[in-house]
Every structure is written in structure tokens, then in C-alpha cells.
Image: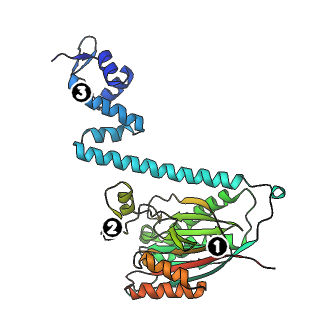
């Protein structure tokens, strides 16, 4: 078998000689022979497929350590690994797109003199939390006020303290005004305060066993600023259609995103409650943030997974569509969850967007 010089191999594989030398040092693409005198590298033609795969994966932006892992796999698992990597890239891109949209929307306020003054809007709201039929205690926290809506689902020995601490860290937004142009900074500060509060909620050995999800919305007068981490959810009922506007931060949801599970399989997966993002317990604490434009007659539901994983989506839509008063709606939703067995704590907030009258 005639070997290829590093120059010929670089040309055939579309990798530079410099890159080939680096990949040799890393053990990613080792030449068949190295001249003992000149240290010149020689490659076999059958190494071209792996070299081209490395080149393509680098074009995807895959880190070298992960490329090395992919190249060591059989074709089927390698394809799965590439699919998982790209799903994560898309998720990261979506998060950056949401942040970009947040900034653009926040900074691109129309001059009030250039357009008619919008109708003043406000929210009507109710919150309720229930222990459920199985748990001995309630580790959820639900809160609703004229500016702040929040649901947190605690876990671990200090879960109840953690969920309360996370929501309490946001409660000052209920009374404090948000300076114009400073909304993003205010939310980031509140998230940092929530992280610290959850950390402080544990004591001694239990500190590592206190964690919580947090899903909160801050009313700005025409928009709702969303902060979300974990698997509590926000749904929007608009024109009779119900939409989930948060993305679960769970291991199972990531497997669905990567194509490893179908949505139907995810509902009964034994790890469906395993979080990959949360406040506390050393988890990834990165929160999703976005601005959501509100319309008159919108209805929002914030809930812990004790409701969303038990009550079918059509039943959620029915209750939210048919029951007018938020107080009655939250009571009916918890009654429904208990009717389905309530294996977990159940918390929900219902908020309606309506026109304010003098």
C-alpha cells in the first residue's frame, strides 16, 4: 500500500498540514509512519474517511475532545452522538435568539408621539397550591400579584424552603418599579438573588439536598417578562388555543430534542422528572429569559409538573376556556389533578390580561 505524504493527505482530506500535526499530537488522527530522521508524517489512503469526518465535524463546530469520542464509535452510535451535539447547538442558538429578541424588543420602543397611545392593560389573577393525595408535605410555592406571577417546585429535604426562597427573591419586583431600559439587569439580579437564597435555604449536609424549579413572569404594563428554569410550565390561552410557551429543562425533554425519544415515549419514561437545569444541588442554573407581548383577553397558566404531567392538555384547555374567574379556575385545576390521583404537589397561577378602566 502506497502511503501519502502529509502534503498529499492534507490536500485529499481538506485538512491543513498544521491541523494534521495537531490531530496527531492529540491522538485523533495518527499517521501510519513517521520518518525517524526527518519526522515527516505519512498516512494510509484508508485514513481519508476518518480525516474527512474530522474535517466535517470541525465545520459543525464540534470540540476536538468530542470529535475524538465520535471517531471511536461505530457508525450508528456516532450518528446518535452527532444528532445529540447538533440538538444542543440548536438549543443554545434558540436561547441566544430569545435573548436577542428580548434586547431588540426592549430597546426598540416606539416613540409614543409617533403612534396612538395603547389601551392600558392590567392582569386579574389567582394562585393556589395543594399537597396532593400522596405526598406528606407541600414543597411547591405559588404566588400571584399585580406585577409578579410565580411557581416554584422544590425538591430534596430542603425543597419547601428552597421554593419559598426562590419566589421570595423575586417578590420585591411586585412593589419596586423597574427603571426604563433596565429590565434585563433587574431580572438577572433577581435570578442571582434567587440562586443565593436557594443555596442559603439548606443548612449543613442538607444544603446539597435543597433545590427548586422557578418559573416567573413580571408584568410590565403591556408585556410579560418570563424567567424560567426547570420543568414548571407556562401555558398561554389565546383565541381558544392553548400553547406551551416554556421548554422543559429535563433529561427526557433533551432526549426528545435529540430524536432519541418520541413525545409519546417521554410521557411514561422513568426519568421524566430528572432535571438538567434547576436552582440548587450544583445543577446548571442558566435561566431562559424572554419578553412576551400580551393581548387583551389572553389567559396565562403557570403550573408545577404536578398538574401538567397528570391532567391531559385538552382538560387544561377546557377549564381555562370555560371558567371565567381565575379563583374558580385554579380551584378546578387542582380538583382535576386530585381526580387523577395527584402523586405530587400541585400548584398553579391563572392570570387574565384585561383592559383597565378609569
Q: Quadrant of residue 38?
A: top left
At x 60%, y 50%, the residue is 100
Of residues 148 and 189, the one drawn nearer to the viewer in this rendering: 148
Mark 3, residue position: 47
Can the viewer see residue 83?
Answer: yes
Q: Comparing marks 2 and 3, which lies closer to the viewer?
A: 2
Left or right, 37 with respect to 184, comes to left
Q: Position of residue 309 (x, y in %)?
A: 40, 75
Q: Quadrant of residue 223?
A: bottom right
Q: Is 311 situated above or below 211?
A: below
Of residues 169 and 178, the one drawn nearer to the viewer in this rendering: 178
Q: Comparing marks 2 and 1, which lies closer to the viewer?
A: 2
Cα separation, mark 2 vs mark 1, equals: 34 Å
Residue located farthest toward the left when viewing the structure as drawn? 1
Secondary structure of the residue carrying tag 3 is helix
**Scheme by which the image is coloured:** rainbow
Mark 1, residue position: 148
The quarter in which the N terminus is drawn is top left
Pointers 2 and 1 in contact (C-beta within 8 Å): no
Mark 2, residue position: 264
Left or right, 327 with respect to 279, comes to right
Q: Quick one: label 2 or label 3, which is nearer the N terminus?
A: 3
Amino acid at each position: 500500500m502506497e502511503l501519502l505524504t502529509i502534503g498529499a493527505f492534507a490536500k485529499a482530506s481538506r485538512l491543513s498540514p498544521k491541523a494534521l500535526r495537531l490531530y496527531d499530537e492529540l491522538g485523533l488522527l495518527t499517521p501510519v509512519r513517521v520518518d525517524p530522521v526527518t519526522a515527516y508524517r505519512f498516512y494510509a489512503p484508508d485514513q481519508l474517511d476518518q480525516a474527512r469526518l474530522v474535517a466535517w465535524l470541525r465545520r459543525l463546530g464540534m470540540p476536538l475532545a468530542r470529535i475524538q469520542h465520535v471517531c471511536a464509535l461505530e457508525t450508528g452510535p456516532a450518528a446518535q452522538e452527532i444528532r445529540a451535539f447538533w440538538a444542543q447547538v440548536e438549543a443554545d442558538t434558540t436561547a441566544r435568539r430569545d435573548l436577542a429578541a428580548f434586547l431588540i424588543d426592549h430597546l426598540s420602543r416606539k416613540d409614543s408621539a409617533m403612534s396612538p397611545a395603547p389601551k392600558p392593560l392590567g392582569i386579574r389573577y389567582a394562585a393556589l397550591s395543594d399537597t396532593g393525595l400522596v405526598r406528606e408535605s407541600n414543597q411547591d410555592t405559588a404566588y400571584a400579584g399585580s406585577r409578579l406571577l410565580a411557581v416554584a417546585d422544590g425538591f430534596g429535604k430542603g425543597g419547601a424552603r428552597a421554593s419559598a426562597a426562590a419566589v421570595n427573591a423575586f417578590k420585591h419586583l411586585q412593589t419596586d418599579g423597574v427603571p426604563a431600559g433596565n429590565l434585563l439587569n433587574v431580572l438577572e439580579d433577581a435570578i442571582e438573588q434567587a440562586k443565593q437564597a436557594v443555596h442559603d435555604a439548606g443548612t449543613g449536609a442538607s444544603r446539597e439536598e435543597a433545590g427548586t424549579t422557578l418559573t416567573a413572569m413580571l408584568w410590565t404594563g403591556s408585556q410579560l417578562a418570563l424567567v424560567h428554569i426547570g420543568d414548571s410550565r407556562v401555558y398561554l390561552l389565546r383565541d381558544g388555543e392553548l400553547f406551551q410557551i416554556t421548554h422543559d429543562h429535563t433529561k427526557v425533554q433533551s432526549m426528545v430534542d435529540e430524536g432519541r425519544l418520541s413525545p409519546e415515549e417521554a410521557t411514561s419514561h422513568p426519568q421524566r422528572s430528572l432535571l438538567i437545569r434547576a436552582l440548587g444541588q450544583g445543577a446548571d442554573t442558566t435561566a431562559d429569559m424572554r419578553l412576551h407581548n400580551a393581548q387583551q383577553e389572553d389567559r396565562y397558566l403557570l403550573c408545577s409538573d404536578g398538574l401538567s404531567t397528570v391532567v391531559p392538555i385538552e382538560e387544561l384547555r377546557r377549564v381555562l376556556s370555560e371558567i371565567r374567574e381565575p379563583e374558580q379556575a385554579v380551584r378546578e385545576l387542582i380538583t382535576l389533578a386530585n381526580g387523577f390521583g395527584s402523586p405530587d404537589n400541585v400548584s398553579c397561577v391563572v392570570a387574565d390580561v384585561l383592559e383597565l378602566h378609569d
